[in-house]
Structures are given as C-alpha cells and as structure tokens.
C-alpha cells in the first residue's frame, strides 16, 4: 500500500459534533490526564530524574503489569492530595489542564480547584467539551527550550486523523510507546483508536527489545526513532502484517532497514511539530515527504503553509493562490503564555484554595490567547510558519533540511550550539554530544552533555580534557561553561532531546 494516498472528501473532513467524537470518553481522557500529570510533576521536580513518586499508587501498578487493556487505565480514584503537591505545584497543574482543554470557554475551569480526584477532573473536562469543543492545546516537549503552549482547531486535528484512519483502517490494535498528552500521542493513542474502535496497549511498561516480539498481525506500533532503535536490538522477528509508525525526530536510514529486515510490513514516518501537528508523511528513507492533504504550500514562499480549502462539497483541493492572509506562528504568540510556570508565577504560592478561583480563571484565560487557533477556529484562513528549512521538489513533496534558526544570543552575539555539537563529536573520545543555552538563572551561557566512546580512558576527567581542547577552537562566548558526562543523552518519553537539571552539572572550570 506504500505510495497510495486516500483523499478524504470535505464532507468527511467537516468537524463532527461532540457526540460523534468518540475520543471524548472517560477512559481515554484518564490516560491523557495521567501522562500529563506525571510529566508536569517531573518537570516541576527535576531532582526526581524522570521517576514517578511512590505516591502514584495504583496508576503505575497497573501500567507496569502485563500488556493488556488494563495497562492503560489509570486509577480514577487517585487522590491528588496524596502526591504531596505544594500550593504552587497544584496551581501550575490545574492551570495547565484548564488552558490545554480550554475550560475557561465554559467557565468550568474554577471547578478544578474544588476537586481532588483524577476522575473528577476527567468529568469536568468532559462536561466542558460537551459545551465547547472548538480547539485543543498541547505543550511542546521543551526540546528547544522552555515548553510552549500550542493551540489547534479541532477540525484540523480531525482532518489529519480521518486521513490516517483511511490509511490504517484495517488495524486491530495500537501498541504505543509514546505519552498521550503530547500531540503525537493524542492523535494516535486517543483519536485514531477511538475512531477505529480498537484497543490501545502500553509498551512503556516493558523493555523496547521485547516490543516487536509481542506484536500480532494487524497491530500498529506507535513509537519514535529512539524507541525503535532499542526495539530492533532483540532477535525476535515481527509477526506478519505489523505496521510501525514513527515521528518526533528524523528516522535514520539504517533504522528503516532494521525495521524492514525485522519483518515490519510498513514503516510510516510523519514529519510534524507540536506547533503544526502532522505536516507530511513518507514510507521509505530515500524518498521525500509528501504534504498531508489538509495542508498546502503557501504561494511564493518556502517557509509557510496554509490549510487546504475544503469548502466545495465533495472536494479536497490544495489551494495555490495569492490571498491577503494573516500569517501567524502556530505556537503561542508574544501575548500568550509560553509556559504554565510563567502563567502562575504571579500567583501567591499559598493561594491553593477556592478563594483564588477568580485569579486562576483570569490566568488561564490570559494564557489562552493563541492567535493561530483563534483565527482558524473562527473560520479565517491562516498561514503557519514552518519550524524547519525544507527543500521543496514541487508543491507537495519536500525534504527536511534543518531548523530555520539554530542560533542563540550570548552577550548580544549570535552563537550556534549545533556547531559546537559537531565540533565535540569530532573529538576521538566523544560518541554523542548535545549543546544548548542554560537558563538566565544559570548564567545564560552554553552547556554541553557528552556521551563518551565505549573505550574512553578515565571518563571522570573527560570534561576537563574537553574544556582545554575546546578553548583553542572556540571563542570565549562559544565555550560551554559546564560539561556533563553521561551514558546517554537525556531524552523525553517521546524520544526527543530534553534539558538536564542544574544540580547534575559538572562545572568544568
């Protein structure tokens, strides 16, 4: 089926009423809330190094059990007070949920402060979506800095998942290795299986190397390159008619070959972002991506897309015309709240009570001013900016080159972390490296995370050797002020590079 494209008519792509949106159900929402809750707690408590606290109770007890339907059913009776949240953490989490699900649109955001059970929060969200279901927001992974909140009109998410449902309509189960609260996970852990009426099973409970062996004919494995790279280290062959779906990072050609050699019937790579959702897709490493049917390349530009005009009954045509169109970034605008931490920073840290309901409501409303979603949900044709440089072959096919601007400013000078990464990787004792700018609280200079080669001599002293080696090759502003040595680069549950906590810095000088 590789290379075949299903065109969904505009009648199929029209937004559905709430009652016909099957992903809005209690079990699916509990899965999303479970992942969102623990991800936010881990972000707020970096010293835990990604581990959930012991107070999580039955939530992960089920998740760590045998792969079954129950493995993705968090405990609705989970008492939030048992997590030991301080007042600021509680306000941060409630604000994030209110903004992500747009509860301020129905005035139900304040009710989050009155409830202390995960199941009660799920019901509040369901009640709100029954009244207003025009948009949904997602946080970025933070792989390029502070997490941002990106709002999406529901009808665009529906267009995307309707298309994929046409491509994957014969699947019997979804085996997922990605969290459900990010946009990739929500689309394929929540929307797709609900639309197809198939179960979702969690692969995060076990080792990736056993995942392929557990797959059965008709399964769809939803993962990312880092997960699949570990999964292919096992010797087990994949059952017939198993499809692998990957996104969040480029899939190396060698990994394509490994998955096909293991027996995967198809490997589908999605190019997209938290800001724009899915953009393009391909089914071979040596071919270009092709735009998904609901996107069109904006005319006379290489860095913008616009939604496909589907107003004509029974048609789904790409638009390629000059229009007086508002160009917006699909991420939060300057007036938006780019992170929930910023949104609640002005609140009293001792204000986790119902008396502060009005403040939380105002904060959530202010945080949800994303112009892209507002314009699109209101029916205005908008253009969105791409996050990467693309090499366009025509109006539909493209290759992904690199992010549009990898520079950061240090002391008023543009510095390029990727250049320092490449330089570090040329050192004979370095296998992998990541470089990024530290926060202003940490000095705002560059920091590096380095994975040594297997036969590195005295890894404990490698940071000092690298510091001296870099000093003769970089300007003072380019020199990383901290170098951390570790066995592997820090990555999120979705396989994306993430920041590393300040307390594990290894100051090189």
Image (spheres, grey):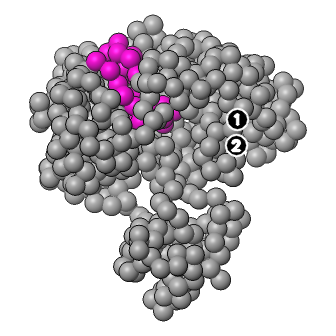
Q: Is residue 163 shown left or right of residue 424?
A: left
SS at mark 1 in the image: helix
The residue depicted at 22 percent of the width and 18 percent of the height is 170
The N terminus appears in which quarter of the rendering? top left
Q: Nearer the viewer, residue 274 or 262?
A: 262
Q: Residue 192 in magenta? A: yes
Q: Residue 397 in magenta? A: no
Q: Is residue 392 above or below residue 107?
A: below
Q: Position of residue 164 (x, y in %)?
A: 27, 27
Q: Is residue 493 shown left or right of residue 386?
A: right
Q: Position of residue 34 (x, y in %)?
A: 59, 28
- Please say whether residue 278 is visible from this viewpoint: yes
**Disc 1 from disc 2: Cα separation:** 28 Å
The residue depicted at 86 percent of the width and 35 percent of the height is 351
How would you rate the neighbour count of disc 2 (Cα within 10 Å): few for under 14, some for 14-19, many for 20 or more?
Answer: many
- Please say whether residue 159 is visible from this viewpoint: no
Q: Is residue 148 shown left or right of residue 382?
A: right
SS at mark 2 in the image: helix
Q: Position of residue 93 (x, y in %)?
A: 68, 34
Q: Nearer the viewer, residue 303 or 65?
A: 65
How would you rate the neighbour count of disc 1 (Cα within 10 Å): few for under 14, some for 14-19, many for 20 or more?
Answer: few
**Which numbered circle lies on residue 54?**
1
The earlier-in-sequence mark between 1 and 2 is 1
**Which numbered circle lies on residue 452?**
none
User: In the image, which is nearer the foreground, mark 1 or mark 2?
Assistant: 1
Q: Position of residue 138 (x, y in %)?
A: 51, 36
Quarter-wise, where is residue 203 in the image? top left
The residue depicted at 23 percent of the width and 34 percent of the height is 238
Query: Which residue is the site of mark 2?
Result: 343
Highlighted magenta segment, given as a residue range: 172-200
């Amino acid at each position: 089926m590789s290379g075949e494209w299903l065109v969904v008519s505009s009648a199929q792509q029209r937004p559905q009423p709430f009652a016909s949106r099957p992903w809005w159900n209690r079990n699916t929402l509990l899965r999303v809330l479970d992942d969102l809750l623990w991800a936010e707690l881990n972000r707020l408590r970096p010293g835990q190094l990604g581990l959930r606290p012991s107070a999580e109770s039955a939530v992960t007890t089920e998740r760590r059990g045998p792969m079954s339907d129950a493995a993705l059913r968090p405990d609705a009776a989970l008492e939030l007070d048992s997590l030991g949240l301080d007042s600021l953490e509680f306000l941060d989490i409630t604000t994030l949920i209110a903004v992500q699900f747009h509860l301020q649109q129905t005035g139900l955001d304040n009710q989050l402060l009155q409830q202390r059970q995960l199941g009660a929060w799920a019901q509040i969200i369901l009640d709100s979506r029954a009244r207003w279901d025009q948009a949904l927001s997602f946080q970025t992974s933070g792989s390029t800095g502070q997490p941002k909140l990106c709002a999406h009109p529901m009808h665009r998410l529906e267009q995307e998942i309707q298309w994929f449902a046409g491509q994957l309509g014969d699947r019997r189960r979804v085996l997922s290795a990605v969290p459900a609260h990010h946009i990739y996970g929500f689309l394929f852990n929540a929307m797709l299986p609900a639309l197809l009426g198939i179960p979702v099973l969690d692969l995060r409970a076990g080792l990736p190397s056993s995942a392929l062996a557990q797959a059965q004919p008709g399964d769809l494995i939803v993962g990312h390159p880092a997960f699949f790279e570990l999964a292919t280290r096992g010797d087990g062959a994949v059952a017939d008619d198993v499809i692998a779906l990957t996104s969040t990072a480029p899939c190396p050609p060698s990994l394509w070959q490994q998955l096909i050699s293991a027996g995967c019937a198809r490997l589908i790579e999605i190019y997209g972002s938290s800001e724009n959702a899915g953009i393009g897709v391909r089914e071979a490493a040596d071919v270009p991506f092709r735009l998904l049917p609901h996107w069109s390349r904006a005319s006379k530009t290489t860095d913008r897309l616009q939604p496909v005009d589907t107003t004509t009954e029974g048609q789904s045509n790409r638009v390629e015309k000059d229009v007086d169109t508002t160009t917006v970034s699909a991420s939060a605008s300057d007036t938006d709240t780019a992170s929930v931490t910023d949104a609640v920073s002005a609140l009293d840290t001792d204000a986790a009570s119902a008396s502060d309901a009005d403040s939380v409501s105002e904060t959530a409303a202010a945080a949800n001013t994303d112009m892209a979603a507002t314009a699109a949900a209101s029916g205005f044709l908008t253009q969105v900016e791409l996050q990467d440089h693309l090499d366009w072959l025509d109006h539909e096919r493209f290759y992904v080159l690199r992010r549009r601007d990898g520079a950061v400013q240090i002391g008023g000078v543009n510095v390029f972390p990727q250049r320092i990464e490449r330089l570090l990787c040329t050192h004979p004792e370095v296998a992998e490296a990541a470089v990024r700018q530290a926060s202003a609280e940490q000095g705002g200079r560059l920091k590096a995370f380095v994975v040594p080669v297997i036969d590195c001599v005295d890894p404990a002293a490698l940071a000092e050797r690298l510091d001296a080696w870099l000093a003769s090759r970089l300007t003072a502003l380019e020199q990383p002020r901290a170098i951390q040595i570790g066995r592997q680069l820090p990555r999120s549950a979705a396989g994306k590079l993430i920041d590393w906590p300040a307390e594990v810095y290894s100051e090189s000088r």
